Image (cartoon, rainbow, N blue to C red):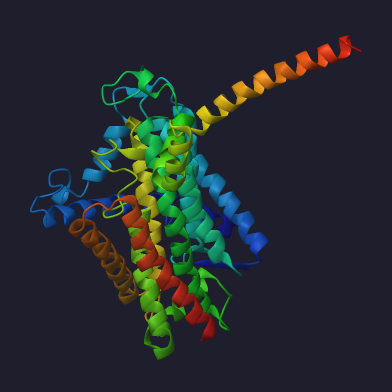
């Protein structure tokens, strides 16, 4: 029992909890910046650490240790900090449902708890933190963000639920993340489920793009147009926390996609060299697709974005849900 | 060493709550240990505009009315312009209520006269 508790605390704080997620978040941010720079014929981060790999960590510490924090007269920075910390905490706690966790919790319908912790809570905490630092630009950014997530969050939810449902039907713990990943690979080879998986994959990429607020869905922050949108009033440590929350949100969504959509290490074992390499390759593949879309597209207007999410996100998951219920 | 716990949803939620509390506590301690403490309060950033440009946080009722009438109710707007000239229901209500006030005063006078005359 004591060993299990220690294992649980280690999982939450070190691997794959806080320390691992933050490190992976910085590495992912580095890759996003480096890939984007290559697309735009720039060098990207190059000076801090080998090949500039420590630049995100340096930026984070620089914001955290800024000489003085500037807050506007009407702001509530303590409240904003609290919301952002709760958001980060909820993302970190969601990792116990991921199959790569050393302390893995599985339960019937745990995919719902995972979705709530890793997607709904961080989003609402980010919105509440933004509203704690009021400004006209913040209000516009938050209203745009809410418009987008009204469509994108149900799409992301369906993208998790449909493969988990198909993979755990009659096998293992029903609707459990850790039971699903081992059999998801089979869904990609069966002729009756491959169409469902392709539709879900397309919708997943769209929903990730919206969650990350990357072009063409970078409407909530819309740099230049509405200053920095929902994060206009974030400075210093608050901005560092908000950026960390954003990175962790993206990282956990990509890990969830790697396991639930692409099967994680399957067909290899989890702790084998081949399995680890396969997980890394699948993660990088998803990230590369997201960064490529980010760099080849310009910003949509809000109604164009909603139309695109509906067309390539909502309709595919509705069709996939109907097909999966008929299979 | 991997530990896998298969629980009922209530058990999973309990463990998740503890995990969340622990991670929030750790993030909070690390954040407050590392963050800068000097705070300077500034005015609201409004691209160089003074704060009174946002003194009304929401658009006025009149702006919302005109926005609705001109964008979504064009035919109704046309009718109103023909009938009430300004196209504002508010003007129409004010015009009618002025007549209504005269009617009320008239009614009160008639009532008093009627009572006095027996």
Q: How many marks?
A: 0
In this orientation, which residue lies closer to the viewer: B69 or A261?
B69
Q: Looking at the image, which residue is at 39% across and 90% down?
A: A191
Whether residue B58 is visible here, answered yes or no, is no
In this orientation, which residue lies closer to the viewer: A183 or A210?
A210
Q: Quadrant of the N terminus of chain A?
A: bottom right
In this orientation, which residue lies closer to the viewer: A188 or A210?
A210
User: Furthest residue to the top?
Assistant: B116
In this orientation, which residue lies closer to the viewer: A231 or A37?
A231
Q: Looking at the image, which residue is at 47% across and 64% down?
A: A98
Give how far across and how far down residue B107 sits, in percent: 75, 19
Give the answer, above or below, for where A165 lies relative to A301.
Answer: below
Q: Is residue B96 left or right of residue A16?
A: right
User: Furthest residue to the left?
Assistant: A41
Give the answer, above or below, for where A157 lies relative to A24.
Answer: below
Give the answer, above or below, for where A113 lies relative to A327.
Answer: above
User: Furthest residue to the bottom?
Assistant: A191
Give how far across and how far down residue A42 sits, in percent: 9, 50
Q: Is residue A127 left or right of residue A6?
A: left
Give how far across and how far down residue B66 sits, in percent: 42, 36
Figure quadrant of residue B14: bottom right
Whether residue B53 is visible here, answered yes or no, is yes
User: Furthest residue to the front?
Assistant: B117
Figure quadrant of residue A105: bottom right
Q: Looking at the image, which residue is at 28% across and 43% down?
A: A222
Give how far across and how far down residue A53 sits, in percent: 20, 50
Q: Looking at the image, which residue is at 30% across and 66% down?
A: A286
Q: Is residue A323 left or right of residue A70?
A: right
């Amino acid at each position: 029992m004591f060993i299990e508790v220690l294992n649980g605390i280690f999982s939450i704080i070190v691997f794959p909890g806080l320390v691992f997620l933050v490190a992976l978040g910085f590495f992912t941010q580095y890759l996003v910046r480096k890939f984007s720079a290559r697309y735009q014929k720039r060098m990207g981060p190059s000076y801090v650490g080998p090949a500039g790999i420590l630049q995100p960590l340096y930026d984070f510490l620089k914001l955290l240790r800024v000489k003085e924090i500037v807050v506007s007269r009407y702001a509530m920075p303590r409240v904003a900090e609290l919301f952002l910390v709760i958001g980060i905490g909820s993302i970190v706690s969601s990792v116990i449902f991921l199959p790569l966790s050393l302390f893995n919790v599985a339960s019937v319908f745990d995919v719902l708890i995972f979705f709530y912790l890793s997607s709904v809570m961080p989003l609402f905490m980010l919105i509440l933190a933004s509203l704690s630092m009021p400004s006209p630009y913040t209000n516009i950014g938050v209203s745009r963000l809410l418009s987008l997530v009204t469509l994108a969050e149900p799409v992301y939810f369906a993208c998790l639920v449909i493969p988990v449902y198909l993979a755990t039907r009659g096998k293992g713990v029903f609707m459990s993340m850790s039971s699903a990943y081992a059999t998801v690979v089979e869904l990609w080879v069966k002729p009756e489920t491959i169409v469902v998986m392709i539709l879900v994959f397309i919708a997943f990429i769209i929903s990730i793009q919206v969650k990350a607020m990357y072009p063409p869905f970078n409407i909530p922050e819309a740099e230049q147009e509405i200053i920095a949108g929902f994060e206009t009033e974030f400075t210093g440590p608050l901005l560092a926390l908000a950026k960390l929350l954003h990175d962790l949100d993206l990282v956990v969504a990509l890990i969830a996609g790697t396991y639930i959509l692409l099967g994680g290490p399957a067909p290899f074992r989890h702790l084998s060299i081949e399995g680890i390499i396969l997980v890394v390759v699948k993660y990088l593949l998803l990230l590369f697709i997201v960064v490529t879309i980010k760099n080849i597209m310009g910003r949509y207007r809000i109604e164009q974005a909603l139309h695109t999410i509906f067309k390539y996100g909502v309709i595919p998951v509705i069709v996939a849900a109907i097909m999966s219920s008929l299979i | 060493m991997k530990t896998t716990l298969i629980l009922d949803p209530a058990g999973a939620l309990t463990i998740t709550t503890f995990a969340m509390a622990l991670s929030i506590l750790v993030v909070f301690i690390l954040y407050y240990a590392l963050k800068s403490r000097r705070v300077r309060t500034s005015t609201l950033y409004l691209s160089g505009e003074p704060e009174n440009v946002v003194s009304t946080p929401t658009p006025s009722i009149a702006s919302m009315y005109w926005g609705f009438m001109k964008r979504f109710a064009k035919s109704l707007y046309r009718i109103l312009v023909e009938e009430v000239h300004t196209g504002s229901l508010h003007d129409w209500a004010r015009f009618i209520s002025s007549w209504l006030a005269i009617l009320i005063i008239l009614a009160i006078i008639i009532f008093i006269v009627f009572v006095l005359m027996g």
